[in-house]
Amino acid sequence: MIESEGLKISNLSPRNNFTTPDMSVREKELLAFRAYLDLANDLEVDLVRVTQGHLYPSVAYEKQWEACVECIKRCLKMADDLGITLFLDNHFFASLADNVDMIAEIGSENLKMNVDVGNAAAQGEDCLDIIRKNRRLIVHTHVKDFKRIDSIIETGFGRPGVFQLKETKRLRWVAIGDGEVDVKGFVKTLRDVNYEGFLSIENEGAESMRSAVDPDAPDETVKKGLAYLRKLIG
């Protein structure tokens, strides 16, 4: 049905948690991840996201990192058997720079990365430089936009002492092109490095939440963002 409509599933995106200190929970997460891989195989989808998990302040970051590496290696073994490529995403536990380091540590040609330009911008990370230096690792992207509003919140992201912010302004997600994210520079840099994968709109605004539960409530911000992206792509 999907192919008959001229569409393609870009990836499957399980939201797994391998940072939990509870080993029994990690084992359950691995079983769930296997089910996603089997589904991807049935749907002939060759890309599956793997996330590290949540950041637990009460647990040493190094311990969480080690648990992630162990679990992702096991996920890769399962994925390799099915001819599926896994990719890391930059949110919750890890920045883009962290993901580059984790990929290098694991050392698998079958582990790549997604670049979420909105998450990177929210945390002050220069994703354009990372794209230029790591083109061979990038197999997928998330595009979104935001405006900062006045409320201040405490936040943490990525490896302590490497990519932590003590505080940041709360974000309001808006239509792509209406906010502060350098989407134009993002698209240009992807073109400069000959990226040929998907630009996946990841809208986290209020309209998106409504349309997810009510198919009769169209998400106008997605329509507006899509039009903006099409202009940039040409």
Image (cartoon, grey):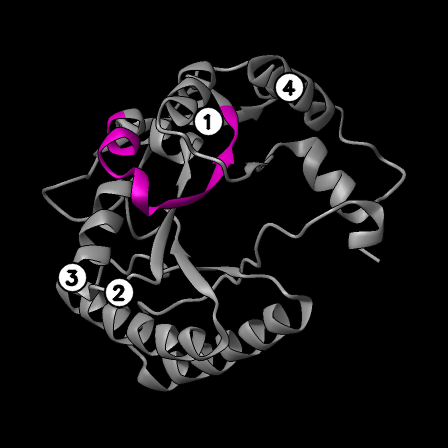
Residue located 79% across and 48% down the image? 213
Amino acid at the residue labelled 4: Arg
For residue 201, side relative to residue 209 (left or right): left
Amino acid at the residue labelled 1: Leu
Residue located 35% across and 70% down the image? 18
Q: Which mark, residue 105?
A: 3
**Disc 4 to disc 3, how far (Cα)?**
37 Å
Dot 4: what SS?
Answer: helix
Marks 2 and 4, the one that precedes in the sequence: 2
Dot 3: what SS?
Answer: helix
* Mark 3 burial class by Cα count in 10 Å: few <14, some 14-19, many 20+: few
Quadrant (top left, top right, bottom left, bottom right) of the N terminus? bottom right
Which of the 4 image quarters holds residue 26? bottom left
**Disc 1 to disc 4, how far (Cα)?**
25 Å
Quadrant (top left, top right, bottom left, bottom right) of the C terminus? top right
Relative to 196, residue 33 above or below: below
- Could you say where residue 75 lies in the image, as x and y percent from the top left? 38, 74
Q: Is residue 195 part of the magenta span, yes or no?
A: no
Which residue was labeled with disc 4? 230
**Disc 1 to disc 2, how far (Cα)?**
35 Å
**Segment tinted magenta in the rendering:** 129-145
Amino acid at the residue labelled 3: Glu
Q: Are marks 2 and 4 in contact (CB under 8 Å)?
A: no
Marks 1 and 2, the one that precedes in the sequence: 2
Which marked residue is nearer to the observer: mark 1 or mark 2? 2
Q: Which mark, residue 108?
A: 2
**Disc 2 to disc 4, how far (Cα)?**
34 Å
Dot 2: what SS?
Answer: loop
Q: Are marks 2 and 3 in contact (CB under 8 Å)?
A: no
